[in-house]
Amino acid sequence: MIELVIAERCTGCNACVEVCPTNVLDPVSVGPPLIARQEDCQTCFMCELYCRGDAIYVAPDCENPTPVDKDAILASGLLGEFRRDHGWDEWAGDPRYPNEHWRMESVFLRARDIAIEAAAKRSGNHTAGS
């Protein structure tokens, strides 16, 4: 579950907001995105994967929020590990880290559709048959 967006590392690009299949993050006018709906996080790591500033920490527990210490996370070397281990961005040409995320594309698209439908139902804006 997403636990931390580190302001000092965030570039404000909002890529994490755009790729989140369950709309957990809200953009703000100044500063890093707000973790607005943490309980909706599926722990898919998409936000962490697309964060080129390595400003996001997603804990592996997908059921419960995990208390984290920002300084401990910064010292741990975990930031950016997911991008590296999946061969993204500056790691793309390194054969030690093959990019296999393309295999999940349909899963993430389906998750986003489900989240949009659920949000529409909660707000009363769903269509007949859904």
Image (spheres, helix red, strand yellow):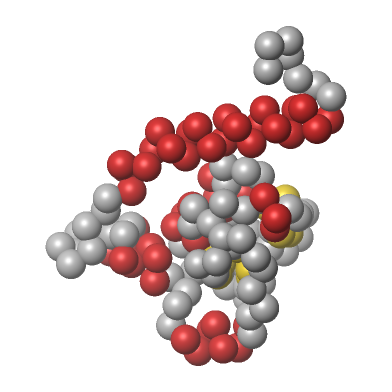
- The answer to whether one can see residue 11 in this image is no
Q: Is residue 91 left or right of residue 9?
A: left
The image position of residue 105, as x and y in percent, is 39, 38
The image position of residue 22, as x and y in percent, is 62, 43
Which residue of the protein is positioned furthest toward the right in this rendering? Answer: 124
Q: Nearer the viewer, residue 39 or 86?
A: 39
Q: Residue at x 18, y 67 (%)?
A: 96
Q: Is residue 87 left or right of residue 43?
A: left
Occupied quadrant, residue 4: bottom right
Q: Quadrant of the N terminus?
A: bottom right
Q: Residue at x 64, y 36 (%)?
A: 115
Q: Residue at x 60, y 32 (%)?
A: 114
Is 17 situated above or below 57? above
Q: Nearer the viewer, residue 78 or 6?
A: 78
Which residue of the protein is positioned furthest toward the left in this rendering? Answer: 95
The image position of residue 124, as x and y in percent, is 84, 24
Occupied quadrant, residue 21: top right
Q: Is residue 108 left or right of residue 24?
A: left
Q: Quadrant of the C terminus?
A: top right
- The answer to whether one can see residue 120 in this image is yes
Is 126 situated above or below 102? above
The image position of residue 46, as x and y in percent, is 49, 52
Is 55 situated above or below 122? below
What is the total number of numbered labels drawn onto the structure image? 0
Q: Residue at x 80, y 21 (%)?
A: 125
